[in-house]
Each structure stands twice: as C-alpha cells, then as structure tokens.
Amino acid sequence: MSTGNLIQNYLQRDIPCDCGRTHNCQVKTVEIGRHVLEKIPALLRKENKQKAYIIADKNTYQAAGERLVQIFKKEGTDFSVYILRSDEVVADETALGEIVLNMPSDADVMISVGAGTINDLCKFASYKLGIDYIAVASAPSMDGFASVGAALIANHLKTTYQTHTPIAIFGDTEVLKNAPMDMITAGFADILAKYTCLLDWKVSHLINDEYYCEMVVNMVKDAIAKVMSLADKILERDDDAIESIMEALVLTGIAMSFVGISRPASGSEHHMSHYWEMKFLMQERKPVLHGIKVGIGTVASSCMYHRLLEEKLDFDEARKKAQEFDKKHWEQEMHRVFELAADGVIALENEVGKNDSAGHAKRIKVIEEKWPEITAAVKEWLPQAEEIENILLSVRLPINPLQVGVDAGLIFDCVRYAKEVRNRYTILQLLWDLGLSEQYADMVREYFTANKQANYVNLIKKQTQSRIDKIKCFVLDMDGTIYLENRLFPFAKEALKAIKDSGREYCFFTNNSSNSKKNYLTKLNNMGIPVTEDRLFISTHVIMEFLKKNHPGASIYLVGTENLHQEFVDNGFLLTENKPDMVVLGFDTSLTYEKLRKACDYIRHGALYYGINPDKNCPVENLEYIPDCGSIAKLIETSTDRYPAEFFGKPSKRVLEYVMERTGYQEEEIAMIGDRLYTDIATATDTKATSILVLTGESTVEDIEKQGIQPDIIFNSLEDLIPYL
Ligand SMILES: [Mg+2]
Ligand SMILES: [Zn+2]
Ligand SMILES: [Zn+2]
C-alpha cells in the first residue's frame, strides 16, 4: 500500500486505540503527487464552496499561487487572491490584520499557499472567521499542515493556539521538488527532530504520567524510517524522496490531531529553536528557517540525553536544590532574557507552577524510581549527537548554532530558560529538576564552542576529504581560477600536477566565448600548462552541439569576435548577415554599433535568439572588469524586449552533460572548480557533482549569502586542494 493510501486511511474516521482514546482527524483529503493542484476546483464544487480567498506571499505566489490562479481561471472557479506585502512575512497581528482587511465578504473558503507562516496565519484567520481552509504546500518544509495548532507571535510571545485543521492538504510534487533546497532540507530536519521530541514525550509520560499513545508514536516512527531510507536522494530532488518528506510532515500533523497536542512533533529541540527565534525577532535579525534551527536543537538535545546517561545522579543534592528555588531571582532572569515577552512567561509560571517546590520534590522521587526506565528509553531510541550531525551534514545542513548566528550566550540561556515558554516537560525541565540546568548549559555551550570549534574544523576537513575522495575529474574554470588574464597563479602548475599524480584527471571549461580553442590551447601551453585538445571546453562548444542537434542547417547571425566566427565556420555552421533564422550572441569584445543594430533588428523581427554565456562581467588584471555577454544581452533586451531563450555556458545543466559525455565520468565523480558563484558553482547546484569555490577571482565569502549560492567546498585558492589529493 502506498503511503498516499495510508494517509487516507487515517482521515475522517474514528480509530479506537489502546491508549484509551478514539482518534480522529478532521482533514478530509490529502493529495500528494504530480499535478494534484488540478484537483482543487472539483473539491471546491464537491464541498459546495462559492468563492475561494487565496493567500500567498510574493515567493509562494510564484511557486504555486500563480498556477492555482491559472487553474481556477480555466475551470471558472470564483476566487480572489491576496499577496502579503512583506518580503519576510511574520505570523503576527499585522499579517493577520492584512488578511482580514483584504478578504472579500462573500468568500467561504480560504486557501493558504505557503508553508509555515502563511499556513499558520490562514489556519488561525479562517478558524476565527468560521470558514474552512485548504492548505496548498509551497514547500515540504514543516509539519503543521494537518495539525490544529497555529503558532502566532502575539504581544511579542510565540504562542500556539488551538484552532482547526484544513479540510484538505495539497502537496504537488512539481511545486515541492522545485522549492528552494534549504526549505526541503529544513522539512527533512523537522522530521529528524522527532527523535528527541518523541523521547521527551515518553520521559514526561514516565515522570508525570502524562498521556501517551504508543500507536501515534509508532506512526511517526514509521514515517521517520521511510524518510531516512530515502535521505541520500534528497539533494537530487528525487520525486520519491521529496514526497516521503511531505508525507511524513503531513503524518506528523495528523498525529498531532489524533492526540490534540503537539507532543508527537515538538519537544526540547523545538523549545530551544523557538527561544532563538524569539530572540532574533527582538533583535530584528533575519529569521532562520524553522527546520534548520530544530535540526541543530536535535543535536543539542541528543547531546544532553546521552551525557545524562553517564551521570552519577545525586538525588539528595537535587532535593536540596529544590528547596532553594528563588522566584524573585527567577523573575529577574525572565525579564533579562525574555525582555518584552517576560510578562507572559511569568504569567504562565504563576498559572501552572512548573517550578513549584512541592511538584518538584514529587517529581524527583519519581525520577529516582523510574531512572532505569528513562535511561533504557534513551538507549533504545535516540541516536548519538554525532549521528544526528552526520545526517544533517549529508544534506548539507548546519549542525552548530554558531553557524546560524546563535552565539554562545544564547546557547547557554536556551538550555536554562527555553523551557519557561511552555508548560511542557522535556529534557530541559528534567535537567532543572535534577539541579543540572546550569551545568548542562555550560556543557552544551562548550560542546558547540570551545571544543566543538576545533572539532568543527576537523569535521569540515573530514567532509571535504570524503567529497574529494570520490572525485575523478576536476573541471577547472580558467580566468580567476588558474590565471588572471595573462598572469598564471604561482600555485597553478603544482596543483594540476598533484591532480595528475593522484591518478585523477583535470579539464578546463571556460565560459569566455570571445576566444577560440586554438588560442586557449596556445595560451595554456605557453604558460606551461599541459592540456590536450579533448580536455579543453568552451561554452561555445555546448551551444554548437545544441544547434547541431536542434537546428541543423539554420542560418545564423553571430554577434562575436573573429575567433568566435572562425570557431563556428570551422564547425560547419552557416553564418549570414542577411535574414538569419537565428541570432547567436557571444562575448563580443569587438562589438560595434552596426552589429548591435543588426542583431536587434533581426531579434525584433522574430529570429530565434540564443546567448552563449550568461556572464555579466569578465575579470581582467588589477581586479578590473569588462562587460561580458550577459550585459550585452541586457542592452539588447532593453531595445527589443527579448532575452536569449537560453544560455549555454555555466551554470547551464548542459555543461555537465557535455563534460560527462566527453570525459566519460559520472556526475558524482566530477568537481566544478571556479571563482564565480552564479556560473562555476551554480553548475553543480542540485546535481551530484561537487562544487569548489576558489577566492582568487570574483567572489568573496560574503557573496555566498548575498547570492544564496552555496559551494560544497571553499578554498582560498587552488593550492588548498593539494593536501586533499
Ligand atoms: Mg572565472
Ligand atoms: Zn492512541
Ligand atoms: Zn517543527
């Protein structure tokens, strides 16, 4: 049975359970798969809905909203759409107000197009307005789709409100697999977080006799197992892997609906994550994806649990500490760490008395009795922190709070105080009960900072080594990587020799279409770089292969240098100045107004139009730049309103195909090395190839975040590669 059917089995029916309850989930339909968005109009008709109110933000509108609107138009479905104004929507009073203000009064169903934030907002707003809502996932990034809880920030405090479930959830594979990779891996990490949260639940069950359902726990455990078994296919955006994440996220939501609480999905790792999130918000810092934070939180929780197993507990000492709880001092601390949210936190404590000494003493007694069961539960279920780290690293996720801007102070405080935000028993409260909060806060801080920093560097080295071990062919950029214009980098020869000596191959790929293969070969040979003709590639060759296959015999108006013309003529292409079938734009350093005029003319009159390389600038000596093919294309676009149908140099996926075909290596055996993010590095994005950024040319480390393109490995220069070979 497919998991799709499995999910449907959980919906809209009473499931009597050994836990003593009867479980029920109000979601009527879950559709995960290709093109499922097309099923929404029929569902609306079946549900007798007259007018849909679609909510999206700019990104989710592009990802899925636009398509939904097209489907609705085609089907004649009545709808109104509102796109939230902010670039970084926060689930707070402002966004809620916007949604309500712009809602047409005759709308009878809300459709949230998004993931965490927008889903929470629509869940809450539709609940308050008394209408149904449908969740359309823009990314498999969080598990709140099927749950009743809506997390909002009200009065500076993040609170989960019990609302309702959507009547239907749609996860269209085409949308989900094209979501930004960090959102997909964030969803994956949110599944990983279930390792610690399920344990927190069990521990609370043992200590506080809190309600616990084995069936629900097993349901989530099965979902984790399936996702983990497909984990190595996530970076490839494999359909099954992406669907398994979405299914697990929805199942977790259903699990939450079954028990009416978020226990199956959220524990200490989430509390620490929420704490960081709240602090970031107070400091007006850019938020970090939920899943990314909880993934790191899972490392922290696992680290604490496993350390606790080694502890020689002194229950009498804990009892003594229990009598010493100083509420006044605690309140001061709450004001210090929670700032504007402190009143809410203090009010919660006054209401539930998490830290009251009577309850505390009682718990210590139970912990002492149940200690063997608690330790057995940890040993049986929870992977070591290092295993969690390795899983995160395998999908290139951060493993350390420092990596996402959480500093040592925040790490220390979160272990002690993240527990105060909710009345939920986890390892954090357990440590407090045992009088170990402070000590473990120190330990965790130490784990992630002092010791860890060194470990972390080693870890990165290890990871780099294991990636490079797999590489059999290095595809090197030239300008900015082995030389700058005419100056060969002093380490280039040695590095290339080291590649050869290690039994590997290298080849060159340059986007620079202003020059010919012959000239590049001469240039490299004059510099003393050994290279054969069949190991030097130019973007020009990729487009020529494409044209031969797809437009044989087409006449071409070529905007390019004399060298480029020669290259095309040598390869049997028909160049013309008169009524061409297509215009091909290269990096033309001999561009004239006459050429531009002609090109624009032909393009305006409907000629096919391709660009050879998308580079905006070409680096020359002294860190100067000259305008490249991409910039000329922009000029032509301004005049003609047309942009090349395709570029063929890096980062086109055709580049890898081309190199693989010519060299015979597999994708995972290839490393792209270059100095530029949006071309050299982006070629390897979402492939099994490895990308290596060198900082000897255009890009700096700051550009990585700015451009949002993450290299697998960063080296100061090609020289740094040598020790790994
Ligand atoms: Mg370069
Ligand atoms: Zn149950
Ligand atoms: Zn979560």
Image: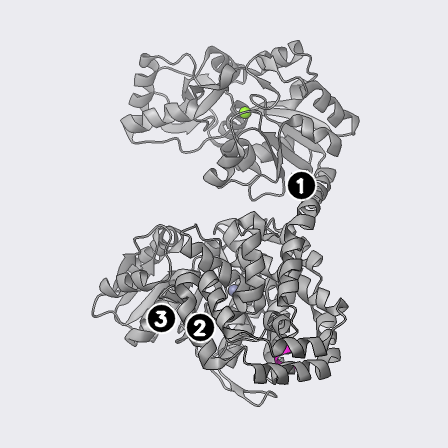
Residue underneath mark 3: 124
Task: Work out how far the residue at label 1 is from the one at label 3, CA to CA, in angstroms.
Answer: 45 Å
Q: Can residue 204 be found in the magenta stretch?
A: yes
Whether residue 28 is visible = no
Q: What residue type is labelled 1?
A: Glu
User: Quadrant where the N terminus lies?
Assistant: bottom right
Quadrant position of residue 668: top right
Q: What residue type is labelled 3?
A: Phe
Front-lying residue, 475 or 371: 371
Front-lying residue, 527 or 593: 527
Name the spot of residue 337 as percent of width and height, x first. Answer: 48, 61
Q: Can residue 395 be found in the magenta stretch?
A: no
User: Quadrant where the C terminus lies?
Assistant: top right
Residue underneath mark 1: 668
**Residue at figure coordinates x 27%, y 61% from the top left:** 98
The segment highlighted magenta reads 202-206
Please tell me whether residue 382 is drawn above or below residue 703 in the rendered image.
below
Please tell me whether residue 493 is drawn above or below residue 659 in the rendered image.
above
Q: Which mark is residue 346?
A: 2
